[in-house]
Image: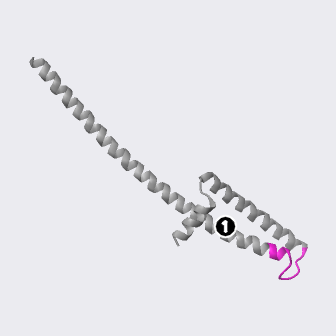
Amino acid sequence: MAHRVYSIARNERDTQRLTDNLQRHSRLLYEANRELRKATRAKSEFVSKMSHEFRAALNVIIGFTELMLDEVPGPINQQQRHSLNDILASSQRLQALVDKYLEHSGLKDEEVVQNTFKNE
């Protein structure tokens, strides 16, 4: 009988120890997940702000380059035209890379705009 009581007590201690370990690990996992969500939000906000800044600058560069190519400010020579075409092509490639990154990162245009104006 004493052996049976000792066995039950040992099982209860083991069960309590396992329960305590499970609760401790559960708290650690909860904290890790909370930190991960926080880091993910920070990354999304950073990408959103940076993509907005890149897009704004690239749109200005592309717009002014197109104006120069259309000779709105005045005539340009062939060497200038060639350089402006290089600027335009490079700017458009960079803009496409930003768009692809946003697409692959899971951010949509609406999220970029919302996060940009929410944090300004």
Where is residue 107 drawn, in percent x and y? 59, 57
Q: Per the image, is 67 magenta?
A: yes
Where is residue 4 drawn, in percent x and y? 14, 19
Q: Between residues 56 and 1, which one lies in front from this camera angle?
A: 1
In the picture shown, does residue 34 fall above or below 50? above
Residue numbers of the magenta segment: 66-77
* Mark 1 Cα-neighbour bin, 10 Å: few <14, some 14–19, many ≥20: some
In the picture shown, does residue 76 fall above or below 88? below
Q: Determine whether the residue tagged by mark 1 lies in a helix, strand or loop.
A: helix
Q: Per the image, is 69 magenta?
A: yes
Left or right: where does residue 82 sit relative to residue 54?
Answer: right
Where is residue 106 drawn, in percent x and y? 59, 53
Left or right: where does residue 96 sit relative to residue 52?
Answer: right
Q: Which residue is mark 1?
A: 55
The answer to which quarter of the image holds residue 79 is bottom right
Where is residue 100 drawn, in percent x and y? 67, 55
* Picture mark count: 1
Left or right: where does residue 58 sit relative to residue 111?
Answer: right
Q: Between residues 91 and 41, which one lies in front from this camera angle?
A: 41
The answer to which quarter of the image holds residue 47 is bottom right
Left or right: where does residue 57 sit relative to residue 114?
Answer: right
Q: Between residues 33 and 92, which one lies in front from this camera angle?
A: 33
Tell me the quarter of the image containing the N terminus. Answer: top left
Q: What residue is at 33 percent from the left and 41 percent from the top?
A: 25
Q: What residue is at 78 percent from the left and 67 percent from the top?
A: 87
Q: What residue is at 22 percent from the left and 30 percent from the top?
A: 14
The answer to which quarter of the image holds residue 85 is bottom right
- Identify which amino acid the numbered label 1 is placed on: Arg
Query: Which residue sits furthest left?
Result: 2
